[in-house]
Image (tube, rainbow, N blue to C red):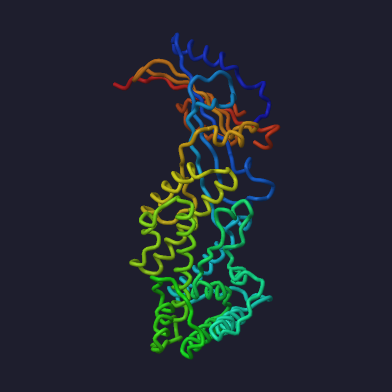
């Protein structure tokens, strides 16, 4: 079984001598490997909930001097990141909830069954839309009294709900147009009827000329087209039957959320508009557009975690963004995927220098080419794969380190590889 008793660990010189005797070699080289879990070390108190997320670093180096030594800074290191979206403690959790509502609408469009969110006790979408339209009408009539509240504060869009450490990099966009502000009100719609009632109010206000809302240039949703028609006093008849209102709201939400993600990646100089084209393309069907927005959100969560937990700067976030985007241009959404970024150990050393590794391994080798032979000694917090049925596996598994950094239990594995001639 596992042990925390380090007196059971061999001396490196003993291992080297054993290898020399076994393989009749005079010169041996050593190579080290260590793996450290970073997400637990970097998380401050309860910032990361229990989830399938993991951030760990693999480090390799030559010239091992002692068993369980901390890797030298000249080592080669790879950061491994697997992150599940939707941690309630994430600074972008409110945006994740917006995305979930977008997925509800997309599913409703596809299956004809919409799982509406539970009604909020404190506010209703219909009431928020009524107040919003009344404010716009007052502005147009010229009798709007400006309060001491910042207008973007009144919008109260959830992307503003960010942690202080992330606020500087992911704040609320200040350029939300009418349809985007409407989405911020309507994302708490709790029934099909309420959805119709909200859009009925908006369309009547447009038909009567009570509001003349501003929309982004290039906005192509059906609601934006209606608004453009209203500028000229000629609006087409709008059907609010069947899936039409769901489609209308989904289009608005898609446009708004795409702009949120683009604003982040371009604002942080992590990608160009051209590079983001694939993720925001309107030339694919709506379901695929939603799928690509999910990919954008997953990449955002990764960047936010690396910024908040590991204090990554632009020079580290930029190559990581390129790796994520390249993967997602070629593969479907996969939150189990491990993204790998080559880094310098110094970048994350403070998170592991006082911690015990999850895995630590030394490889002793001699000979060259086909005559090369190796002895590997490893400790791991996870039990080695069972090889008991195999008689020629070469594993001498005298299990022997899991738990707190003070007293970690390790499983010991030793492998010896000899050359076998096949005739």
Q: Is residue 361 above or below residue 191?
A: above
Q: Position of residue 184 (x, y in %)?
A: 55, 72
Q: Is residue 401 visible?
A: no
Quadrant of res 119 = bottom right
**Is 345 placed above or below 285 here?**
above
In this rendering, the count of numbered labels is 0
Q: Quadrant of the C terminus?
A: top left
Image vertical order of residue 62 relative to residue 186, above or below: above
Give the residue drawn at x 36%, y 67%. Answer: 282
Nearer to us in this view, 239 or 156: 156
The quadrant in which the N terminus is found is top right
Rendered view: 245 above or below 292: below
Q: Is residue 400 left or right of residue 24?
A: right
Nearer to the camera, 221 or 368: 221
- The answer, for residue 257, to whether it is visible in the render is yes
- Residue 357 in the image, given as x and y percentages of width and height: 59, 32
Q: Is residue 46 left or right of residue 313?
A: right
Residue at the image point whose x is 55% and y is 40% from the top? 56
Q: Nearer the viewer, residue 143 or 137?
A: 143
Residue most extreme to the left: 423
Q: Position of residue 419 (x, y in %)?
A: 38, 19
Specify the farthest residue to the front.
Answer: 142
Question: Where does residue 284 sit, x and y in percent of width and height?
Answer: 34, 66
């Amino acid at each position: 079984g596992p042990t925390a008793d380090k007196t059971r660990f061999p001396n490196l010189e003993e291992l080297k001598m054993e290898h020399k005797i076994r393989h009749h070699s005079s010169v041996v080289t050593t190579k080290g490997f260590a793996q450290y879990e970073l997400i637990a070390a970097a998380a401050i108190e309860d910032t990361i909930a229990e989830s399938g997320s993991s951030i760990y670093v693999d480090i390799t180096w030559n010239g091992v001097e002692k068993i369980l030594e901390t890797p030298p800074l000249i080592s080669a290191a790879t950061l491994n990141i697997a992150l599940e979206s939707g941690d309630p403690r994430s600074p972008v959790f409110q945006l994740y909830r917006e995305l979930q509502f977008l997925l509800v609408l997309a599913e409703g469009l596809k299956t004809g069954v919409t799982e509406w969110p539970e009604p909020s006790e404190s506010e209703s979408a219909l009431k928020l839309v009524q107040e919003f339209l009344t404010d716009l009408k007052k502005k147009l009539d010229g009798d709007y009294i400006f309060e001491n509240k910042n207008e973007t504060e009144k919008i109260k869009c959830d992307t503003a709900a960010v942690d202080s450490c992330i606020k500087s990099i992911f704040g609320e966009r200040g350029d939300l147009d009418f349809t985007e502000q409407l989405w911020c009100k309507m994302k708490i719609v709790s029934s099909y009827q309420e959805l119709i009632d909200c859009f009925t109010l908006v369309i009547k206000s447009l038909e009567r000329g009570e509001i003349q809302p501003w929309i982004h240039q290039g906005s192509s949703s059906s609601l934006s087209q209606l608004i453009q028609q209203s500028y000229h006093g000629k609006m087409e008849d709008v059907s609010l039957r069947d899936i039409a209102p769901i489609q209308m709201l989904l289009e608005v939400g898609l446009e708004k959320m795409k702009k949120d993600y683009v604003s982040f990646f371009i604002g942080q100089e992590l990608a160009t508009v051209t590079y983001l084209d694939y993720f925001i393309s309107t030339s694919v069907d709506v379901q695929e557009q939603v799928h690509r927005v999910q990919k954008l959100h997953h990449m955002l969560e990764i960047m936010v975690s690396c910024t908040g937990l590991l204090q990554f700067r632009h020079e580290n976030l930029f190559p990581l963004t390129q790796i994520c985007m390249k993967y997602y241009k070629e593969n479907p959404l996969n939150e189990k995927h491990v993204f790998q970024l080559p880094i310098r150990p110094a970048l994350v050393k403070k998170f592991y220098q006082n911690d015990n590794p999850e895995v630590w391994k030394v490889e002793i080798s001699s000979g060259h080419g086909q005559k090369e032979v190796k002895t590997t000694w490893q400790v791991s917090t996870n039990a080695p794969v069972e090889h008991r049925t195999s008689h020629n596996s070469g594993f001498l598994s005298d299990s022997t380190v899991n738990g707190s950094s003070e007293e970690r239990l390790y499983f010991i594995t030793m492998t010896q590889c000899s050359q076998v001639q096949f005739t």
